[in-house]
């Protein structure tokens, strides 16, 4: 899975909810209780679980990893790991897949970070399942208001019966994240230009 495979479908106008629909099953692999593992190397760079990059047999837990990458992208605006799709030896696995959060996501709540760490667990046997992810307090909206999306109100499910503050809080967070990322990129570009001694102006950042 990847963000490009997700569509949002609005429910009737009387509801403020949307449905998430998954599309493009061209590279999907069917697994079942009788055939719980697969070995084909298919997928998109940046969303492949570690066991796939090690060319090991894998289970449906690779989808939980891809979900973790998607959630990270939605919350932080970038991929969590620099994935070149190359085979990775076991000794290098933890170093490559140590989860680090960008500085523009510094306000991300502990609960959201906890969910991401459990979805992006390099050990497939202890990685969160879909059922565990759905029951996680951050997803279920059971966290304290100060420990939801940010250190301020807002979690994944809007408050019942209205547009509520959580949706607006999410939008505000995304706006701040984009602004912080643009500032960080501008500072990096300025620093690189000054080191080169060729151009001290900051290039326009497209986001």
Image: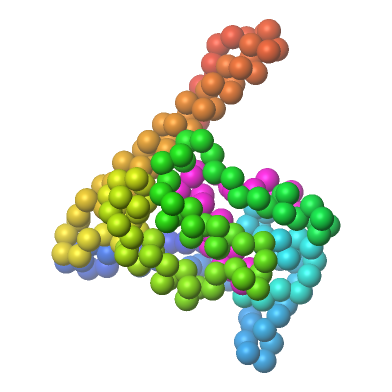
Towards the viewer: 138 or 82: 138
Over which residues does the magenta segment extend? 61-85
For the question of whether residue 18 can be seen, the reply is no
Asked whether, in this view, residue 12 is left or right of residue 37, the answer is: left
Asked whether, in this view, residue 27 is left or right of residue 78, the answer is: right
| Residue that appears at 54% across and 39% down | 102
Q: Is residue 106 magenta?
A: no
Q: Position of residue 71 (x, y in %)?
A: 49, 56
Q: Position of residue 46 (x, y in %)?
A: 65, 53
Towards the viewer: 177 or 97: 97
Q: Quadrant of the N terminus?
A: bottom right
In this view, 116 is above or below 22: above
Where is residue 21, by image quadrant?
A: bottom left
Towards the viewer: 26 or 54: 54
Towards the viewer: 99 or 51: 99
| Figure coloring | rainbow
Where is residue 112, by image quadrant?
A: bottom left
Asked whether, in this view, residue 203 is left or right of residue 168, the answer is: right
Q: Is residue 78 magenta?
A: yes
| Residue that appears at 79% across and 52% down | 92
Q: Position of residue 97 (x, y in %)?
A: 68, 52
Q: Position of residue 109 (x, y in %)?
A: 41, 49
Asked whether, in this view, residue 153 is left or right of residue 77, the answer is: left
| Residue that appears at 59% across and 59% down | 120
Which residue is at the far bottom?
34
């Amino acid at each position: 899975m990847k963000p490009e495979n997700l569509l949002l479908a609005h429910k009737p106008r009387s509801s403020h909810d949307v449905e998430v629909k998954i599309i493009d099953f061209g590279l999907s692999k069917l697994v079942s209780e009788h055939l719980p593992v697969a070995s084909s190397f298919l997928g998109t760079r940046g969303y492949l679980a570690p066991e796939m990059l090690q060319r090991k047999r894998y289970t449906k837990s690779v989808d939980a990893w891809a979900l973790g990458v998607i959630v990270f992208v939605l919350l932080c605006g970038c991929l969590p790991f620099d994935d070149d799709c190359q085979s990775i030896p076991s000794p290098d696995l933890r170093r490559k897949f140590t989860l680090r959060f960008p500085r523009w996501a510094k306000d991300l709540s502990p609960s959201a970070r906890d969910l991401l760490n459990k979805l992006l667990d390099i050990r497939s046997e202890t990685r969160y399942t879909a059922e565990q992810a759905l029951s996680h307090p951050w997803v279920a909206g059971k966290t304290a208001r100060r420990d939801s999306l940010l250190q301020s109100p807002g979690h994944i499910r809007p408050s019942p019966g209205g547009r509520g503050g959580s949706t607006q809080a999410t939008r505000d967070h995304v706006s701040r994240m984009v602004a912080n990322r643009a500032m960080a990129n501008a500072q990096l570009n300025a620093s690189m230009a000054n080191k080169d001694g060729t151009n001290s102006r900051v290039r326009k950042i497209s986001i």
